[in-house]
Amino acid sequence: MKTKLLFQISLLLVSITMLSQSFQESISVSNKNYHDLNMEPTEDGSNDFIVAGNQFDAGMINEEIVLKRVKDDGSITWVQRYSNTPLDKARLFDIVVELNEIYLTGSVDVGGMKTTFIAVVNATTGAMLGFNQYTVISPNFNSRGLKIIKTNSDVNGDSVPDPGFVVGGFISDCYNLDTTCNFNNIGYVMRVDSALNLIWTIEIDGFNSVNNLDYDFVNGITETNDGFFITGSASGTVTNFAQQAVLAHKVDFAGAVQWDSSYIFGNSRDMSVDAYYDAATDEIYMLSNYSVSHFFGITVLDNLTGTIDFSKSWYATGNNYDKYAFKLMESYSGSNSLIITGYDRDENWVDVNSNPQFANSSVFVYEFDKNTGNQVGNSYQFLVPHVEPVTDEFNFWNGQLPIIYFPDISFSMIDTAGNVNYQHVGYRTDSGFTSVELFKTDINKRNECENMDLFITPAPISINPVSVISGPTPNTKIPASIGSNGFNYTVQPCSSFLGVEDNEIEQGSVYPNPAGDFVNISLQNLKSYILIDALGRTVMNGELTNEARIYVGDLNSGLYFIKVSGHDNKSQTYKFMKE
């Protein structure tokens, strides 16, 4: 584990009214753990979005699918929990919104075998509208859907769009996720029409003749102008050593192979997790994670040929290890940059009260230049205490990094008022159980409460190509049904002020922020102050007059805390940055 005591925490200290464009809040359910959280904006002209995931019991044994519709101010319109009866072990992994409907994919147990499902939910009410199972290859194999996208692509070449969906996942002889499965794991992609009827299904497979390790999984699909780019991982071999390789596989709209540029970078585990298609340059920006570097990276490929542009491709380096990417998305600060979001595996810090804190899966946001990988503007890691529940097969941190599942934890949008918004979902441990943590930020990418600055340096990448093949495989659709019901929950906003002891003032602000020579406190009847640096050390103290103005011109640049006390001995702590 890492202990990182030297950090900068930044917070926008303005009035509650001015903060209405952003929020940070946790959503908890008594005695339940959340996992597999992902999110998607609605398409009905509102600024609402859908948060999807699964609720587990204390032992992470039994799960139920959960959806929430959330407004852009953080208030919740509806919640629904979808019961397994008469099915068993229904688990959601991804959603996509199409007009007023939400399409879900995941897996469900049928007679002791896991099968892929696609379900349809009404986005206005949360009511379940339809549920279909798909037995890829045969009912004797387990399958799971990890990704679903919508498409209007032309399947048969008649120049008429064929609206529908594309799902990617994996087939296995093993019931649970297992890279040493006796038969093997095989990635798959299936195309369905708007009524969820099958059009085509392909399987994707790498090669390993060295041992029984098998890393053939599909976790992402990105549509380009002439096909689908597929991410995930493949089994690969370098110098008679088998390992997990980056999947970079392209098929046309009918599922036929166009090219494959899969590769090995490190010495153990590599995988691609998402991609962004740049229509202006006809390039694919592929997001990957590498165990050898303990970081992520970007590979830029020509959409027509699959040729890698090494001048634009890079992997991340830095002193703060174990940051793994989940999502690649548009930046609204300029057309020459993109944003990567993901989770840090484990973070330690000390808060202003000298209390040690720890977090698994803390969200980070990194913006980079498309041509160089260099950081653009400020990037942040959000600090929220959390411990990942153990025992689950899809626990993100059973190993160094997730095996294959990297849900869509963020999205970017311009709302109906023309404001830039970035939405993220993470986790918080509260009373021993895992809650949902939602973040909405504006274009500066900074969350409401505790965070630290993030610094990344790109480095050139070199690769070893591996061979991956794909081709048609059987698939069968089976209609089914599933129930739904509401449930009670608690929403707790994140406080914009860090309180200590009797936190009863709860008003006012520090300004200007960042500060130059002076900071002012917009409160009356204050008696004294203590100024504390980012390491919890007292650097100044004194009495306050009615002016409530403090000279800070001699302080070094960085983060500071001001604890003020009134004549009634009540206190409040504020944060500010010294320029």
Image (cartoon, rainbow, N blue to C red):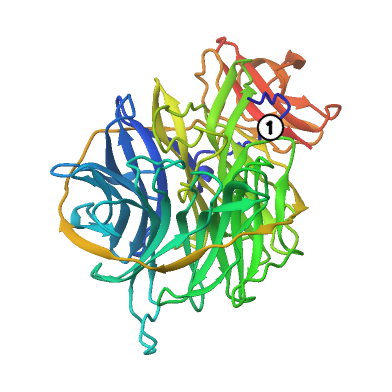
Q: Is residue 314 left or right of residue 331?
A: right
Give the residue type at disc 1: Phe
In the displayed structure, would residue 515 be above or below residue 525?
Answer: below
Q: Nearer the viewer, residue 173 or 38?
A: 173
Q: Is residue 273 left or right of residue 565?
A: left
Q: Nearer the viewer, residue 231 or 269?
A: 269
- Could you say where residue 499 lies in the image, as x and y percent from the top left? 55, 21
In the displayed structure, would residue 448 be above or below residue 236?
Answer: above
Name the residue located 32 percent from the left edge and 24 percent from the top edge: 58
Secondary structure category for the residue under label 1: strand
In the displayed structure, would residue 396 be above or below residue 303?
Answer: above
Can residue 331 be seen in this snapshot? no
Quadrant for residue 149, please give it: bottom left
- Could you say where residue 460 lies in the image, as x and y percent from the top left? 77, 55
- Could you say where residue 405 lies in the image, as x and y percent from the top left? 46, 46
Badge 1: few (under 14), some or many (20 or more) residues near its Cα, within 10 Å? Answer: many
In the displayed structure, would residue 43 be above or below residue 341?
Answer: below
Quadrant for residue 553, please give it: top right
Can residue 471 be seen in this snapshot? yes
Q: Nearer the viewer, residue 109 or 412?
A: 109
- Could you say where residue 428 lies in the image, as x and y percent from the top left? 46, 30
Residue on which disc 1 sits: 576
Name the residue located 46 percent from the left edge and 67 percent from the top edge: 470
Q: Is residue 108 left or right of residue 216?
A: left
Question: Quadrant of the image for the N terminus?
Answer: top right
Q: Is residue 512 left or right of residue 124?
A: right
